[in-house]
Amino acid sequence: MGDPASAARRGPVKPADAAGLVLIRAGASGVPEILIGRRPAKMGFLPGIHVVPGGRVDPPDAMSPYPGAPHPAVTRALSGRRPPLAFLNAALRETHEETGLLVGKPFAGTAPLTHSPFWQAYREAGLAPDYGALDYLCRAITPVTSKRRFNTRFFLGDGNHVAGTLGGNGELEDLAWAKASALGDLTLVDVTEYVLKTALERWTSRAPIGATPAKLLNYRKDIMTLSNRRRSPR
C-alpha cells in the first residue's frame, strides 16, 4: 500500500483528459429517452453508478480519416492544448466501445482503409462522424481528493441517428434507453445529474449548437460548484 503522508506531500493527482456523450432520442410517444448504463461493482472508479458512455482521450483521437469539423462554437469553446477533434472522437469511440453503437451520418465517399476497429466499424456501416451535430454541454473536473481524476468534456448527440446493436465491451451493464421520468430511480452522482439535466433542457428546447455556453463543474471542499470560467485543473 502507498504511504498516505507521501501522497499528501505529492499533492492532487493530475486529472486525465476524458470525454463523454449523452445520446437522447424521441421514444415511441415522443418522450425523450437517454442512453445510460451502470458501471460494474468491480470497477475502481464509480462502481455501481449509472453513467453515460465515456472515457479517456487517447493520442490517436486527435486525428480522423473522415472529413468534417466540430461546429465553430464548439471549436472555440474547446480550444486549448489538445485539438477539439480529440474530445469528440474520444466521446464517439468510447460510446462505440461501451455500447456497440455508432453515431454518425451516411457517407457516400470512398471510405478510408484503417487498422483501427473503431474507424473500420464506420467504414463497414457506411457512416461518417457528424462532428458538426454534436453540442458541447459542460466540462467537469474530479475533486482533488479523488485518487482517480478526470477532466471530462461532455457532449450531446442525437440518439435517433445511431447504428448498431446495443451491447458493448462490458464496461457498462444494464445498458438501456431510459425515459427521462425514470432517471430519479437510477444511482447517479451530482455531475451526471447536472449533465443529464442540461442535456434534456437543450434537447427539449432545440437550442442551436453553441447557443448556451458550457459551464465548468469543479469542486471546492468536495462540494460541486458551477462557473463560466475556463481554468486549468489542479
Image: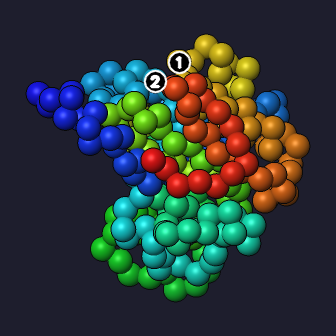
For image coordinates 21% across by 29% down, the residue present is 5
- Front residue of this view, candidates 148 and 44: 148
Q: Choose the circle earlier in sequence order: 2 or 1.
A: 2
Outermost residue toward the left? 1
Q: Is residue 110 left or right of residue 57?
A: right
**x, y percent for residue 124:** 45, 68
Give the image location of residue 206, x and y in percent: 86, 48
* Residue 133 visible at all: yes
Could you say whether the residue bearing mark 2 is in a helix, strand or loop?
A: loop
Dividing the picture into quadrants, the one containing residue 224 is top right
**Which residue is depicted at the point 48% across and 76% down?**
64
- Quarter of the image for residue 173 reads top left
- Rate crowding at label 1 as few (under 14), some (14 to 19) or many (20 or more) other CA atoms within 10 Å: few
Q: Residue under circle 2? A: 49
Q: Quadrant of residue 60?
A: bottom left
Percent position (x, y) of residue 148?
34, 38
The reply to whether dot 2 and dot 1 touch (C-beta < 8 Å) is yes
Identify the residue at image location x=69%, y=26%.
179
Q: Residue furthest top?
A: 185
Q: Give me the C-alpha separation between circle 2 and circle 1.
A: 5 Å
Percent coordinates x, y for residue 39 in the rendering = 40, 29
Is 186 placed left or right of 203 in the picture? left
Residue under the point 27% across and 24% down: 42
Amino acid type of the residue tagged 2 in the rendering:
Ile
Question: Which secondary structure, mark 1?
Answer: loop
- Name the residue furthest front: 9
Label 2 Cα neighbours within 10 Å, binned few <14 / some 14-19 / many ≥20 = some
Q: Which mark is residue 187?
A: 1
Above or below for 140 versus 61: above
Identify residue type, mark 1.
Answer: Thr
